[in-house]
Every structure is written in C-alpha cells, then in structure tokens.
Image (cartoon, rainbow, N blue to C red):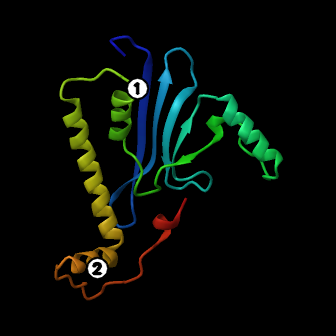
Amino acid sequence: MAGEHLANWTFYFFTDVSSEGFLRVDQMRIALYSVFEPPPIARLEYESSTTGPPVSHWQFHGERGALSFVLARAHQKGKKGSAPMSLSSLHFPTGGRRFRPGVEDFIQFLIDDCGFDRQPAWRRAIEDGREIARRFQVRTIARDYQAEVAQVLRDRGWHVEPPNEFDEHESVEALREY
C-alpha cells in the first residue's frame, strides 16, 4: 500500500473433469495475509465436496470482543454442539457452487476497499477476467438446467425445442445446497 509491502495474498485452485468431460473447479482458496503475523486476515474458500461449512464461504481472522460475547451468550442459551466462539470459526456463505465470488472480485476488493496498490489498466483486466469467468458459469448453468433456460428463452420469444432424447430430470442439488 502506497508502495510499502504490508500484505500478501495467495490463490490456488484444483480442477477436475466432470463425468460429462467438462473442466470444473474442485477446490479454491484465496487468502489475505499480513506480513506481520502468520494467520490469514481473511479467506474465501470453495470446496465442492464438503459436507461441513457452506461449499463457498468467507472466513475472517480478526477477533472482536462484541462478537465473541454474542457467540458465547448464544452458546449458553441452548445451542448444542461446539458453537463458534471466535470470528475465524464462522463460515459466511457466499452463494454456493454456481454463484460464488471469483479471484477478480477479491482483487478488486483489495484495491477498491483496502487501498492496495494497482497497476495501470488494472480495472479493465479485472473486468475482462470477471466477464470470462461469469460467461463460463452461465454456460455451465445453461448446460445443467436446460429445461429452465429453454423456458426463459421461450418466454422471450425464442423458438426452442428439446432434442429427441432429452432427459427432463435436472439435479437441484447445486440450487439447494448451503
């Protein structure tokens, strides 16, 4: 920030090939770290096969007394199991499998909201990358929910007919999961 190295960010993702032969993201993690201490400040995580927290979520590692107090009181009032007692143990959902933020959103957050340094023409590069990523998501949604997309197109005046061997069953898992 202002030319001073105060933080680092990391990005990784693992991909796989779906049963239909399409590339898909299996895991993604974007994290922001201070150069002064090792725990991350914040993490955006996506894990397609998780059974625990939401598949796509933020985690923040900045403790705040008021939140810790509220969490402790909520635990005393009857929440069973291991209730979260710190901000870093909470998983803030971000839209699930299809509607999660991307790396471009995180980079723009660092620049616009946190004041990180930027390169000339950064906004155009971010917007171009975001458009490409979101168009991939649109195509994936259209492929996964063909009957729904066809109906929307018909409602807009398009003439759309299903192929002869079209299976109308659509998986609702990605639409319903936390």
Q: Residue 101: x and y, percent? A: 40, 46
Foreground pick, 54 / 76: 76
> Which residue extends farthest top?
4
The secondary structure type at the circle numbered 1 is: loop
Neighbor class of circle 1 (other Cα within 10 Å; few <14, some 14-19, many 20+) is few
Residue at position x 36%, y 22% in the image:
116
* Side of 14 relative to 36 (left or right): left
- The label number, if any, that marks residue 114 in the structure image: 1
> Which residue extends farthest bottom?
164
- State which tag comes first along the sequence, 2 or 1: 1
The amino acid at mark 1 is Cys
Q: Residue 68: x and y, percent? A: 71, 34
Q: Is residue 88 above or below residue 46?
A: above
Q: Report which quarter residue 59 is drawn in.
A: top right
Q: Is residue 75 above or below residue 108?
A: below
- The label number, if any, that marks residue 71 in the structure image: none
Q: Residue 26: x and y, percent? A: 45, 51
Which residue bears the numbered disc 2? 151
For the residues marked 2 and 1, what is the alpha-carbon distance in whole angstroms?
42 Å
Residue at position x 35%, y 72% in the image:
145
Q: Residue 141: x and y, percent? A: 34, 65
Foreground pick, 64 / 38: 64
The secondary structure type at the circle numbered 2 is: helix
The amino acid at mark 2 is Gln
Residue at position x 17%, y 79% in the image:
157
